[in-house]
Amino acid sequence: MNYEIIKADLDNKETLTNLLQFYIYDFSEFIDAHVEKNGRFDEYPLNDYWTKDNHIPYLIKLNGNYAGFVLVRLIEVETKSFFSISEFFIMKKYRRTGLGRSVAKDIFRLHKGKWEVFQIGKNEPAQLFWRNVINEYTNGHFSERIEEGKRVIQEFVS
């Protein structure tokens, strides 16, 4: 599989903004999101990804074509610091090919340290995906918790 993970910069903002429309469309199955009068979903708040060092945007290409994106954040709260995947998207035509699994593991390798990956409670396909990928990546060395009955969170160290 010939894929690339590209750290996005301002020149890629329009591409990422456009891909986010497909992501929100897919995700609208699990959240209360609707298209506006212009036929588009509300804009995703991307500005921090161009202005803050702890927000890292990536674009995914497969065989030279855009196939998705990953938005990573380094979160620092009180006495702990960890990486988190804010959003992870692989276009439907590239799902179930192993691309998402490979990209996720590469992202974990790119950012060494503590991780917390979370999914909303309703998104059972995402929970299954992340459990399997993280279990495989860590050889079962991760923990999982449910927060407020709404979010499932896997914790591990890469």
Image (cartoon, rainbow, N blue to C red):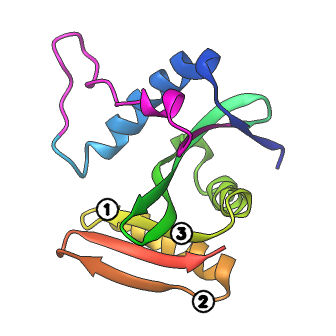
Is 112 part of what is drawn in magenta? Answer: no
Residue picked out by circle 3: 115
Residue picked out by circle 2: 141
Q: Name the amino acid type tagged 3.
A: Trp
Where's residue 40, x and y in %?
A: 28, 19
Residue at image x 24%, y 63%?
A: 122
Residue picked out by circle 1: 123
Say whether residue 98 is left or right of residue 26.
right
Asked if the residue under mark 3 is in contact with the one under mark 1, i.e. CB atoms within 8 Å, the reply is: no
Residue at image x 34%, y 68%?
A: 124
Say whether residue 21 is left or right of residue 66.
left
Numbered tag placed on residue 136 in the rendering: none
Is 55 part of what is drawn in magenta? Answer: yes
Q: Quadrant of residue 24?
A: top left
Q: Is the residue 102 above or below the residue 129 in the image?
A: above
Q: Is the residue 91 above or below the residue 123 in the image?
A: above
Say whether residue 17 is left or right of residue 65.
left
For mark 3, give the secondary structure.
strand
Where's residue 6, x and y in %?
A: 72, 36
Q: Which residue sits furthest front?
A: 79
Q: Name the amino acid type tagged 1.
A: Asn
Where's residue 47, x and y in %?
A: 42, 26
Q: Name the amino acid type tagged 2.
A: His
Q: Which residues are magenta?
A: 33-60
For mark 1, give the secondary structure.
loop
Q: Quadrant of residue 140?
A: bottom right
